[in-house]
Amino acid sequence: MLELKNVTKRYLRRTALDNVSLALEEGKTCLLLGPNGSGKTTMMKLIAGLSRPTDGEITFDGQAIGKVTKALVAYMPTENYFYSYMTIRDIGRYYADFFTDFDPRSFARLLSEMELDEKDRIRQLSSGMAAKLRLALTLSREAKLMMFDEPLNGVDILTRTQTIEAILAGRRDGRTMLISTHLVDELEDVVDYTVFLKKGQLVMAGDKREICAGRTLKDLYLEVYGHVSQESAEEVREHA
């Protein structure tokens, strides 16, 4: 189980997460929702152990987030974190050296499915290709918890479909999946738990069917964030 207890994260004068408590059972596929600045990426980075909470505690499988849990958690960020001169093959070798649960055979299979050439250098990749590479790297680990930060952003509709299928295929052996996105209608049918954040605070969380109560997830999103920025609202409607 993933559990956050009264977690707060402050950056100087800005509070990115404000006293958030949450428990996510093993094997759930969870959608983390909220407009820009709601705290989604901050939460994921805290769970991944890339940042520490100002207050509160986060545990996974009963272990405090740290060296032990880093071996259990795989995180796909939104930004590229590779050197431009590296090839895809170089990055695969780096992951194999760094993560003991990285499976080079799975990586090779995913590269083939996503039509990525291991000889290509990072500087040759489009934004969509780079996103598929980050996805392939994450899914090639045997982590118990997998997190995907806005995996559908900036990719075309075919890549979007391919990304969703790859994430679905990665759900096995009781694996927990945590996905953040604005494109709620794209993932509504594949999740069973939802978390709504707003300005760093937890608005609601629970079983998708129960909290939707007959509404679509998109309708609930627009209801919860009725006063979000015009940019965020338009982004949701654009993909409706």
Image (cartoon, helix red, strand yellow):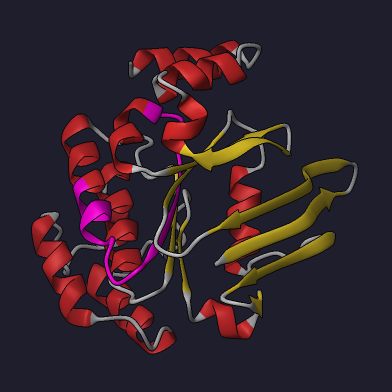
Residue 10 is left or right of residue 101, and the answer is right
Nearer the observer, 207 or 232: 207
* Horizontal and vertical percent position of residue 42: 65, 50
Question: Does residue 230 show up?
Answer: yes
Q: Is residue 9 above or below residue 197?
A: below
Nearer the observer, 113 or 43: 43
Q: Is residue 215 above or below residue 11?
A: above
Q: Residue at x 72, y 51 (%)?
A: 21
| Quarter of the rendering containing residue 143 | bottom left
Q: Is residue 103 above or below residue 157?
A: below
* Horizontal and vertical percent position of residue 45: 61, 59
Q: Residue at x 24, y 47 (%)?
A: 163
The residues colored magenta run 165-184
* Horizontal and vertical percent position of residue 167: 28, 53
Q: Is residue 204 above or below residue 227?
A: below
| Quarter of the rendering containing residue 95 | bottom left
Question: Does residue 52 show up?
Answer: no
The quarter of the rendered structure image containing the C terminus is top left
Residue extending furthest toward the right: 13
**Residue 169 part of the magenta-drawn span:** yes
| Quarter of the rendering containing residue 133 | bottom left
Instruction: Give the total of numbered labels.
Output: 0
Residue 204 is left or right of residue 79, and the answer is right
* Horizontal and vertical percent position of residue 62: 63, 77
Q: Residue at x 52, y 15 (%)?
A: 222
**Residue 70 part of the magenta-drawn span:** no
Q: Residue at x 25, y 49 (%)?
A: 129
Residue 226 is left or right of residue 31, and the answer is right
The quarter of the rendered structure image containing the N terminus is bottom right
Nearer the observer, 216 or 66: 216
Residue 2 is left or right of residue 88, and the answer is right
